[in-house]
Amino acid sequence: MTLATVVWFILIGAVIGVLARLIVPGRNPIGVIMTVLVGIAGALLGGFIADAMGSGRAVAFVFALIIAAVGVAVLTGVQPRTASGRTTTRRRRGRFF
């Protein structure tokens, strides 16, 4: 992987971070800078994986987007959802219920 390719993935990482933030449901309490950093990390990791597999940039973009979305989900603490769309943990009710 050349230096130009690494710079390309860093630039695309900013876009991937924003897209990953849009993919992950619910509130995202992390800031824009952290989102961009997660996107850059996802882009670099996805690029390295795709390069090791001998795949092209389209596959690298898909890998980067998936990795960045998982990274954003982990940092924001997104709860997994059931088939009905509810979160797996129960919500707190009022004081007496």
Image (tube, rainbow, N blue to C red):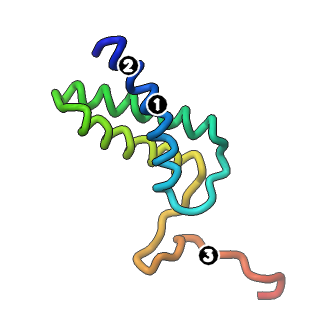
Under circle 3, the secondary element is loop
Q: Alpha-carbon neighbours of circle 1 within 10 Å: few (<14), some, or many (≥20)?
A: many
Task: Decide: few, some or many residues near mark 3? Use Cα within 10 Å; few <14, some 14-19, many ≥20.
Answer: few
Residue extending farthest to the left is 54
In front: label 3 or label 1:
1
The disc placed on residue 90 is 3
- At x 40% / y 42%, what residue is drawn? 67
Task: Mark 2 or mark 1: name the one nearer the start of the chain.
Answer: 2
Q: Nearer the viewer, residue 28 or 11?
A: 11
Label 3 with label 1: CB-CB less than 8 Å: no
Estimate the spatial distance between the alpha carbons at disc 3 and disc 1, rounded to whole Å.
33 Å
Disc 3 marks a residue whose amino acid type is Arg
Label 2: which secondary element: helix
Q: In the depicted view, which residue is nearer to us: 20 or 96?
A: 20
| Residue labelled with disc 2 | 6
7 sits left or right of 61 in the view: right
Do residues under tags 2 and 1 come within 8 Å of each other at their CB atoms? no
Where residue 57 sits in the image (x, y, percent)?
A: 25, 32
Q: Quadrant of the N terminus?
A: top left
Residue receiving disc 1: 41
Relative horizontal placement of residue 81, taking residue 77 as reference (left or right):
left
Quadrant location of residue 92?
bottom right
